[in-house]
Image: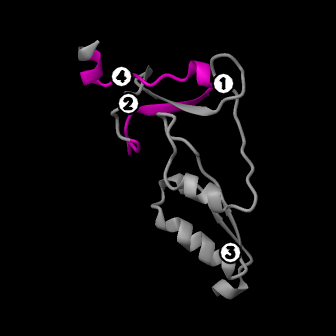
Amino acid sequence: HKLEEVNVIGIDEVQFFEDDIVNIVEKLAENGHRVIVAGLDMDFRGEPFKPMPKLLAVSEHITKLQAVCSVCGSPSSRTQRLINGEPAKVDDPIILVGANESYEPRCRAHHIVAPSENEKEEM
């Protein structure tokens, strides 16, 4: 299909794209395409997940969905990364490919980011 014939463009897992996706999305929208993106706004540390802050800033409509905290049942706003059942450390890589990790939704109160090995030694 030619791009001119496409009305809607959907991009999932947009948090894994580089910041240049913002310019691409804007150019598509300026050319009359409806662009729908989906992705996590924060990484497992609870920090903004690139390029989401910029995409949120230029969005015309935002729908923010929340899961249910796996600990208490409250609305979750965070993603808990577990490695072998334990919270990931603050200095673990943002993206792990093929690692033995799992994720679960957590509220602010139950979201845990383990200190790095260096931080543990300083305590």
First reached walking from the N terminus: tag 2 or tag 3: 3
| Magenta stretch: includes residue 46 | no
Image quarter where the N terminus lies is bottom right
- The image's mark for residue 91 is none
- Measure how far apart labels 2 and 1 are at the Cα level: 20 Å
Q: Residue furthest front?
A: 57
Name the amino acid type tagged 1: Cys
Q: Residue at x 71, y 76 (%)?
A: 33
Badge 3 or badge 4: first in the primary sequence? 3
Location of the C terminus (image quadrant): top left
Q: Which residue is mark 4?
A: 115
Contact between labelled residues 1 and 2, with CB atoms less than 8 Å apart: no
The percent coordinates of residue 113 (x first, y second) are: 44, 25
Provide the residue designation for mark 3. 29
Q: Which mark is residue 90?
A: 2
Residue placed most toward the observer, 81 or 90: 90
Per the image, label 4 sits on a secondary structure element best described as loop
Check contact, mark 2 vs mark 4: CB within 8 A. Answer: yes
Q: Residue at x 39, y 33 (%)?
A: 100
Badge 4 or badge 1: first in the primary sequence: 1
Return the x and y of residue 53 as percentages of the image width and height: 57, 52
| Whole-percent x, y for residue 76 in the image | 66, 29
Quarter of the image for residue 122 reads top left
Q: CA distance from mark 1 to mark 3?
A: 35 Å
Q: Is residue 106 left or right of residue 63?
A: left
Left/right of residue 36 with respect to residue 121 in the rendered view: right
* Front residue (pair 17, 51): 51
Q: Is residue 1 visible?
A: no
Foreground mark, 2 or 1, reads 2
Q: Which residue is mark 1?
A: 69
Tell me the magenta residue range.
Answer: 94-120
Looking at the rendered structure, the kind of residue marked 3 is: Ala
